[in-house]
Image (cartoon, rainbow, N blue to C red):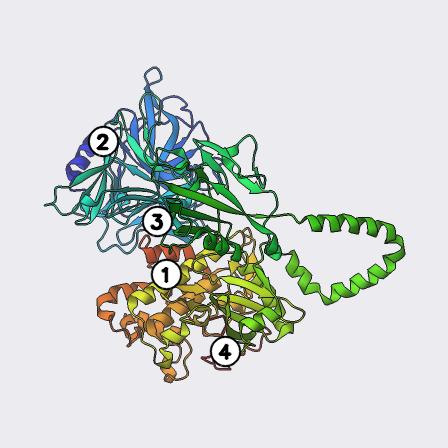
Amino acid sequence: MLSQMALPSFLAFVAVFLLCFSFSVNPQPDRYSIDNYPTASAPASWTNSPSLPHNITFDGGEIVHSLLQRRSSTRGMSFATGFYCFPPCKSFFVSIYIVYADYDTYNNYYFYYDRPQVIWSANRAHPVSENATLQLTSKDGLTLRDSDGSLVWSTSGLNQSVAGINITEAGNLVLFDINNSSIWQSFDHPTDCLVMGQMLAEGMNITANSSSNDLAESQFYLTLRAYGLYGYLHSETTLEYYYNIDDTTSNGTKLAMFMDGNLTMFSTLSNTGIALPIFTFPTAKSIQYMRLESDGHLRLYDSDESPWKMVADLLNPNTCDYPIVCGHYGICNNGQCSCPGNYFKPVDNRRPELGCYAITNITCHDVKNHLLLELNNVSYFSDVDNVELNKIDENSCKRACLRDCNCKAALFQSYNGDLSDGHCLTLSEVFSLKNYPPDASNFTSTAFIKVQASSSKFRLGAVMGSIFGALLFMLTLISIYFVCSRRRKQEQDEDIIEQMSGMPTRFTFEELRAATKNFVKILGKGGFGTVFEGRWGDEKIAVKRLDNVGHGKKDFLAEVETIGSIHHNNLVRLIGFCADKFNRLLVYEYMCNGSLDQWIYCRDGRVPLSWPIRFKIVMDIAKGLCYLHEDCRQKIVHFDIKPENILLDEKFNARVSDFGLSKLIDRDISRVMTKMRGTPGYLAPEWLTAMVTEKVDVYSFGVVVMEILSGRRNLDDSQTEENRHLIKLLEEKSKINALLDLIDINLSDVKSYKKEIVDVMKLAMWCLQWDSTRRPSMSMVVKVLEGGMEVETSLDYNFVSSIPLIVNIPGIVDQSVPLVASVLSGPR
């Protein structure tokens, strides 16, 4: 990229014509001259504070501590990088932004227009505070650390020594070597924007920000694929809301180049000569950039006479094709929003685009009063027939939604009015709907929205009960008091369960006895219960019966409350529960491939897993834990991550199970004190203090990753004395650079993936840091696995303390007792 821009000659030009403006008399704090300082040499360090030489406070309250700045050939425009904050400026992002300035001839200085336009951010999900430090070193490139020293972001893992950093006239932040060749560039890691001259390679994404002042990733992203550009909304499932297809570019890897007047896709095969415009838009009058925004729109901005005018909306011309145009449950008709039927009301009557809410909340305790509100000629932003579902009839589609308490709506589409042959999509979250009048092709679309009907019998009974209670209140007060007190004591747990919101389906004990054929087929046993195979309707289920009611009751309530309120592809799905008297049972989806320990230790003659499957399992576990730690309303710490609690479906998709030991933590609390819990061999060292954070799960994750890579348990009595403790062995091998010795000998394709396996092992070592503050967050782990971030290089290789862990602590098994391989900690 730098060779194309003739960087050496350009830098020489900059060195000759470097301009420095200064104030002669009391300059205002928000008016600074436009210097040209685009390059810095390694090593260099910048601390985020007003003491940095280039600081600007804009009229809107934004503050910039500028580190590098490149004047554009376009008058008044500059690309810059530095610490940037939105008002009230409590946290900062290391960003690339465009500033627009003009020259005041009377006062003889440049002044800035409008707010800067942020086009890229290194730490979009993890803003830093004042006194955070950005360092440039020849080994690691750029490293961002917060004021407490914790690593936030880096470009470490580079294969060449870094000589310096440069921001180009196109807005590309480049690390270069001594020969001025590019080593790393921001153009290869887009966030939510593309600027002119930037390319989007096949498989790369641009992901919208959560809002204009929150740079964290939202649910919307665009990606380039072999046949064009695609837009997706990622919720519990990923749904397509835009596509631009042209199969004439089917050969070679695809690139999309943002040029003046168009976004063009072409093939890397030079002999094809293919270059097809994805979008064509007005030619730039100044600097242009396109941004995927939090509402899913891709908008093109140009700075002409007035700064940053939106000149084109590039995706769907129909406003109703966007997923959140009318909020949840809202129906879009020619850009106007309304609510469906009499069961819903607008969130705000004056702002119908904010969506609708159900007048009566849907509850799984009253499924007999669930109804489907039929909306004819209503479809979804995503084509139902694009979803890979078998064709079914309309009645089956409706029944599928009514049977599933998590289903909030079903959409059925067919042609020629044939209700026996169509496509069905069930939704656990309902975004905007749209009116779709029948067209000439006889296409029909019907939406069935689940609502909670009121029972007239219940209302009449409530009125009569109130009248009767008023008449007899004085006569029966004492009797009611004693009766209620006695019943409250006997049914305390049932009352707790009934009051929980969003609970899954409640079964009777007799229903589950019949489903399991009187609890005959045992899938496994654990410390708190036994798991049986069963069948409910056409679906196989796993029923976990808590044998020790006195001890298992607390874990039972924790699992029901926790799993019943969250849904994720990498978390086991809780179908329902039973709380009849003293019977406590949990009903899970059946995972046909059982738990992970059965595969990584090659039990029962199972075929060893290939590396791609092992890597996918590691990724799935990381995503599940990331959701628990960072995406739930309350932070959820699992406390018992181990292979027995990782379940596999028929395609070896991994899901985290067993939240009986989990703990909900308010997000404003950094640490909690709790009694020791978990399983020996997977416990983080900070359990010695009982003051823990979600980083205990990160440590356990690191142990599980090492077991997946090595094909053995962390604590294995079958090994020799020196090899008995896997993590201790990892310490020794890492210090002598012999990590390959730890790879599972049963991994047949190790030669093809040797580097990737070692990289994942280094990630595990980062997770196993003795100091919990040095461990990555699970979102950072996911980024490393996805290739968007490098592993921290300055690691402490002492993963295991020489201090023996205290034993016989209530709530944990004595460490002197060896682990039994058949212990079951979750359904399978």
Q: Which is nearer the N-term, disc 1 or disc 2?
A: 2
Q: CA distance from mark 4 to mark 3?
A: 39 Å
Q: Which is nearer the N-term, disc 4 or disc 3?
A: 3
Badge number at residue 521: 4
How many marks the image carries: the answer is 4
Q: CA distance from mark 3 to mark 1?
A: 26 Å
Q: Report the front residue among 322 and 195.
A: 322
Helix, strand or loop for disc 4: loop
Badge number at residue 665: none
Residue furthest right in the image: 475
Q: Which is nearer the N-term, disc 2 or disc 4?
A: 2
Relative to 169, say whether 818 is above or below.
below
**For the point 87% across and 53% down, which residue is it?**
472
Q: Amino acid at mark 1?
A: Met
- Nearer to us: label 2 or label 4: 4
Q: Amino acid at mark 2?
A: Asp
